Amino acid sequence: MSIWSEKGVLVEAESVSFRSFDEAWRPIEEVAEILDSLWIDELIANGLVTCHAQPILNGDEEVIAYEMLARFYREDGSVIFPGEIFSAARKRSRLYALDRLCRMTAVRFASFIDKKHSSILYLQAFTHLSSA
């Protein structure tokens, strides 16, 4: 595939690259999938995440802590699966922002759980996925 450069020269698409901000240069072929992932920016900006508290039990089946599980929904209420969320965030270099949103939401939701255990939370760290 060939494209026209800004100087009016026809060049092979394989030799064209782009970058946003201070990110690494990427092949032009990746532009479409990055643009298809723009919705993740809106999800993060609008905080379209909720949390569910999963109790963590000891051997006597007593609640000793809670794991906060992030769940994502489109504006129409349909579920967005984790693979789709993290793939889009990775493509848009938004894993840190998504991780921050999840943590902040988990802390807010923690105020609704049993006060006896509300100071003991397990927050799943998502930032390690950035190198995956």
Image (tube, rainbow, N blue to C red):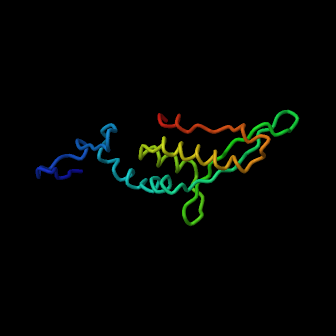
Question: In the drawing, does residue 82 fall left or right of residue 24?
Answer: right
Asked where in the image residue 74 lies, by quadrant, the reply is: bottom right
Q: Position of residue 132 (x, y in %)?
A: 49, 36
- Seen from this angle, which residue lies furthest bottom? 76
**Residue toward you, 106 or 80:** 106
Position of residue 20 relative to residue 42, above or below, is above
Q: Position of residue 44 (x, y in %)?
A: 49, 52
Q: Residue at x 17, y 52 (%)?
A: 4
Question: In the drawing, does residue 58 fall left or right of residue 50?
Answer: right
Question: In the drawing, does residue 109 fall left or right of residue 14?
Answer: right
Q: Residue at x 55, y 39 (%)?
A: 126
Q: Position of residue 58 (x, y in %)?
A: 82, 34
Q: Position of residue 30 (x, y in %)?
A: 35, 47
Q: Residue at x 22, y 41 (%)?
A: 15
Question: In the drawing, does residue 105 fall left or right of residue 112?
Answer: left
Position of residue 79 relative to residue 16, above or below, is below
Q: Residue at x 52, y 37 (%)?
A: 127
**Residue toward you, 70 or 87:** 70
- Seen from this angle, which residue lies furthest right? 60
Q: How many numbered discs sit on the rendered protein?
A: 0
